[in-house]
């Protein structure tokens, strides 16, 4: 009860006032009902020669008429007045109590009504919050499902493109390896004369390949950062749950698709460039210095063209990004049409790439057929020349049979020694993970008693970790086994390593 009064200060004030009034009335009533004290008994005083008055007896004297007792009359009136006042006070207190009860009842009803209203509002707010949360959760789940589907489709398409590119790269490498091996078998002496120039050219190619690999790594890193930024931005936009969020997400996805398309085009151009460089290298080997100069000019022109295309793509991307903010609302209506056009463009691009690959493969096959015919013709000429010089060679061989091994013996011994070196290096090679399709060509010169004199990785289409691990394995394999012919020391060996 006291806690309820503290909550209602008005009721507490009136309760204190009423209690004070009751206390005052009780005090007044006690004073009125108090019995009057009788007068004190007289004390006899002795005076010389006189009798005390107290000892004198008085006789009652009857009055000639009846006399009212004023003391009893006053007491009766006071009692009647006190009773009347008490009755009036009780009635007033009863009325005050009724008013207090009515006020308390009204206040209690008002509090109950306010509590019910607050409870109803709280329930409505809770229901609204639950509805909003459920709606937001459904929208977030739907957006997440769409994002996962888009990412899965993109990953599958990217994996298919990478597999196609790896297959094309493997075929190009196989064609280059077969062509190089055939040329080596047909013109070993000529290859030795051109070896220095070829090694310089291969070194330049390796540096260019490293630059391209570095650029690709930077682009992959940039793409990864862009994807991470896109995912972070998508999470923030999903919390906002509005139309602008969806527009921004689609814009970021469009930018990512454009970037991936540019990378795919660049990779396709890189494949075409490698195939073209293989053909130009073969022509350069046949035409020597003149064709090498033409090849260098073509490569420079291609690099300039590639740089110009990249700069153009970069400028277009920057211009598009700058105008994207102004075109967000206008693009919403044309988005479905743009998506259809994009799909058609992607299909057309894939068809063009496949057609170019088929044409390139066909040209490579035709070129190999021409090379084979030319090689056969050269072989016939060489056979005729060999027949003419056979007698002379035989005489020289008889005269010099103790002077040193024959070229065929040198070649056989070099092949056997190279196989031993590759087995030794492979047993000490700590290869990195995911080396499928990687390949490296090494130019190696060994000095007695089996230490490296000169080591160069002339061609490596793998990652930098792959090339570095191969170099480390070569140095860990020292000393190498002895060759069958000591003349092979300080000679350049061309070894191909594939995981």
Image (cartoon, helix red, strand yellow):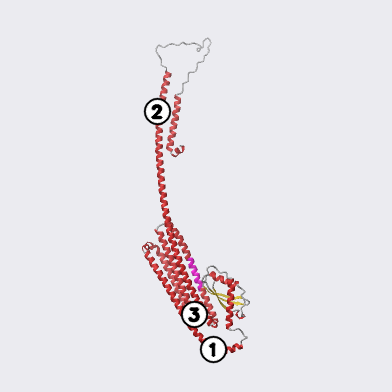
Q: Is residue 292 visible?
A: no
- Foreground residue among 392 and 97: 392
Q: CA distance from mark 3 to mark 2?
A: 133 Å
Q: Nearer the viewer, residue 387 or 283?
A: 387
Task: Please provide the residue range marked out in magenta.
Answer: 208-222
Q: Quadrant of the N terminus?
A: top left
- The disc, 2 or 1, on the residue closer to the chain's N-terminal end is 2
SS for tag 2? helix
Kindly check if marks 3 and 2 are in contact, taking CB atoms under 8 A apart as contact.
no
The image quadrant of residue 257 is: bottom left
Q: Residues within 10 Å of mark 3 (few under 14, many from 20)?
A: some
Residue 221 on the magenta segment: yes
Dot 1 or dot 3: first in sequence order is 3
Q: Position of residue 309 (x, y in %)?
A: 43, 72
Q: Which mark is residue 318?
A: none
Left or right: residue 486 versus residue 252 is right
Q: Position of residue 190 (x, y in %)?
A: 54, 83
Q: Is residue 67 above or below residue 184?
A: above
Q: In this view of the protein, can residue 436 be seen by the observer?
A: yes
- The residue under the point 41% across, 53% down is 132
Q: Nearer the viewer, mark 2 or mark 1?
A: 1
Q: Which residue is mark 3?
A: 282
Q: Secondary structure at mark 3?
A: helix
Q: Measured from the top left, where is residue 172 in percent x and y?
A: 48, 75
Looking at the image, which residue is at 41% across and 35% down?
A: 101
- For disc 1, the marked residue is 387
Q: Earlier in the sequence, mark 3 or mark 2?
A: 2
Q: To which residue does mark 2 refer?
A: 88
Q: Going 41% across and 41% down the picture, which residue do you hit?
A: 112
């Amino acid at each position: 009860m006291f806690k309820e009064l503290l909550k209602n200060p008005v009721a507490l004030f009136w309760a204190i006032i009423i209690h004070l009034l009751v206390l005052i009335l009780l005090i007044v009533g006690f004073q009125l009902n108090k019995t009057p004290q009788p007068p004190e008994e007289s004390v006899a005083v002795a005076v010389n020669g006189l009798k005390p008055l107290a000892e004198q007896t008085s006789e009652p004297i009857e009055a000639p008429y009846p006399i009212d007792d004023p003391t009893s009359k006053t007491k009766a009136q006071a009692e009647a007045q006190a009773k009347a006042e008490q009755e009036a006070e009780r009635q007033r207190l009863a009325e005050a109590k009724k008013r207090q009860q009515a006020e308390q009842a009204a206040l209690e009803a008002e509090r109950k009504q306010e509590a019910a209203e607050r409870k109803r509002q709280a329930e409505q707010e809770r229901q609204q919050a639950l509805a909003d949360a459920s709606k937001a959760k459904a929208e977030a789940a739907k957006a997440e499902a769409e994002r996962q589907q888009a990412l899965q489709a993109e990953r599958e398409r990217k994996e298919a493109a990478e597999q196609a590119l790896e297959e094309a790269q493997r075929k190009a490498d196989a064609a280059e390896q077969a062509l190089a091996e055939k040329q080596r078998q047909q013109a070993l002496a000529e290859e030795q004369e051109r070896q220095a120039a070829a090694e310089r050219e291969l070194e330049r190619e390796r540096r260019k390949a490293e630059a391209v690999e570095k650029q690709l790594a930077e682009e992959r890193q940039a793409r990864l950062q862009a994807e991470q930024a896109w995912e972070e931005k998508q999470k923030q936009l999903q919390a906002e749950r509005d139309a602008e969020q969806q527009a921004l997400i689609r814009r970021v996805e469009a930018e990512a698709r454009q970037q991936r398309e540019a990378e795919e085009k660049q990779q396709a151009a890189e494949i075409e460039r490698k195939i073209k460089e293989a053909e130009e290298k073969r022509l350069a080997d046949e035409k020597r210095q003149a064709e090498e100069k033409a090849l260098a000019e073509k490569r420079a022109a291609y690099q300039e063209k590639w740089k110009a295309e990249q700069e153009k793509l970069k400028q277009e991307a920057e211009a598009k990004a700058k105008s994207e903010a102004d075109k967000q609302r206008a693009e919403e209506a044309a988005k479905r049409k743009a998506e259809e056009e994009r799909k058609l463009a992607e299909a057309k691009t894939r068809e063009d790439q496949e057609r170019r690959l088929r044409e390139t493969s066909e040209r490579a096959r035709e070129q190999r057929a021409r090379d084979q015919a030319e090689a056969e013709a050269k072989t016939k000429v060489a056979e005729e020349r060999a027949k003419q010089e056979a007698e002379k060679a035989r005489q020289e061989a008889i005269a010099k049979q103790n002077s040193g091994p024959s070229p065929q013996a040198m070649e056989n011994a070099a092949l056997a020694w190279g196989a031993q070196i590759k087995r030794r290096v492979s047993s000490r090679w700590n290869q990195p993970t995911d080396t499928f399709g990687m390949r490296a060509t090494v130019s190696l010169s060994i000095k007695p008693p089996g230490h490296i004199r000169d080591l160069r990785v002339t061609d490596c289409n793998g990652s930098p970790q792959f090339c570095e691990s191969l170099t480390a394995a070569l140095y860990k394999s020292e000393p190498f086994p002895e060759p069958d012919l000591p003349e092979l020391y300080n000679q350049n060996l061309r070894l191909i390593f594939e995981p």
